[in-house]
Image (cartoon, grey):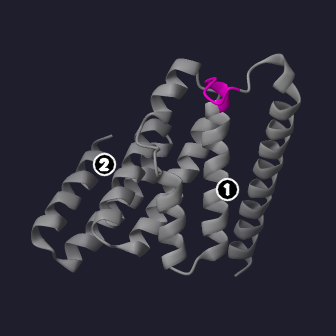
Amino acid sequence: MASSRVAAALHVRAEATGSTEDLLHAADASRRATAAIGELSLVWAYDTALYWAEWSWRHGRSADAAEAYLLTLRTLNQLARAQLSRAYGELVLRRRTRGLVGRAAHALTRRRRLPEAAVALESGRAVLLSAALERDLVGLTSPEHAPVRERYRRAVDRLTTLEDRALSEASTREEQA
């Protein structure tokens, strides 16, 4: 968890100095912290990646923002899959998710990473809508809406399968290269 605090401090330093070297060092620290923390706590990993993403977004660093938002969305997706208790899941989803998906897609689009932007937009919206369904916020909880909920859950499962396949294929290509 200390690596998350170090990364945040390095972002503060980079903001104060404006040094390119400090900016790169802060981004690298955030990248490493998110990876290391993800093994211990998905919530801390989410917070670390989101801090990096929002900082990069505010400072116009679209390449860092794109990478950080992708990490944030991947971690959010992992959190959604982790079968957290309802109360814990609500706590996580209240952590600055408003606008997250749109900023992620925008940052990726600015970097001309259009397929990733589309996936980020749709998968992020799917996770957030799924959470909203779970929390009874959409108004589709009555018995007559069961077919709609079931179709949506199948669509989310299909998206998850396709994402897993795409990640697996990307790993295979990287290993072959």
Q: Label the magenta part by its dominant secondary structure.
A: loop
Residue 33: in sight, yes or no? yes
Rendered location of residue 79, percent (x, y): 57, 37
Which is more toward the observer, 101 or 65? 101
Q: Give SS at disc 1.
A: helix
Where residue 3 is drawn, which disc sits there?
A: 2
Rendered location of residue 44, percent (x, y): 40, 39
Rendered location of residue 53, percent (x, y): 39, 59
* Distance from the alpha carbon under mark 2 to that under mark 1: 31 Å
* The N terminus - image quarter: top left
Q: Amino acid at mark 1?
A: Glu
Q: Which residues are magenta?
A: 133-139
Residue ID at (54%, 47%): 75
Rendered location of residue 167, percent (x, y): 71, 61
Which is more toward the observer, 148 or 155? 148
Q: Residue furthest left?
A: 16
Q: Which residue is mark 1?
A: 122
* Marks 2, 1: nearer the viewer: 1
Taking the image as shown, residue 33 lies to the left or right of residue 155, namely left
Do the residues bearing badges 2 and 1 touch, measured as CB atoms within 8 Å? no
Is 134 colored magenta in this rendering?
A: yes
Residue 41: in sight, yes or no? no
Q: Amino acid at mark 2?
A: Ser
* Mark 2 nearby-residue class (10 Å; few <14, some 14–19, many ≥20): some
**As drawn, 84 above or below 69:** above
Residue ID at (67%, 30%): 133
Taking the image as shown, residue 145 lies to the left or right of residue 88, namely right
Which is more toward the observer, 97 or 168? 97
Please state the total of marks drawn on the protein image: 2
**As drawn, 122 above or below 140:** below
Is 118 colored magenta in this rendering?
A: no
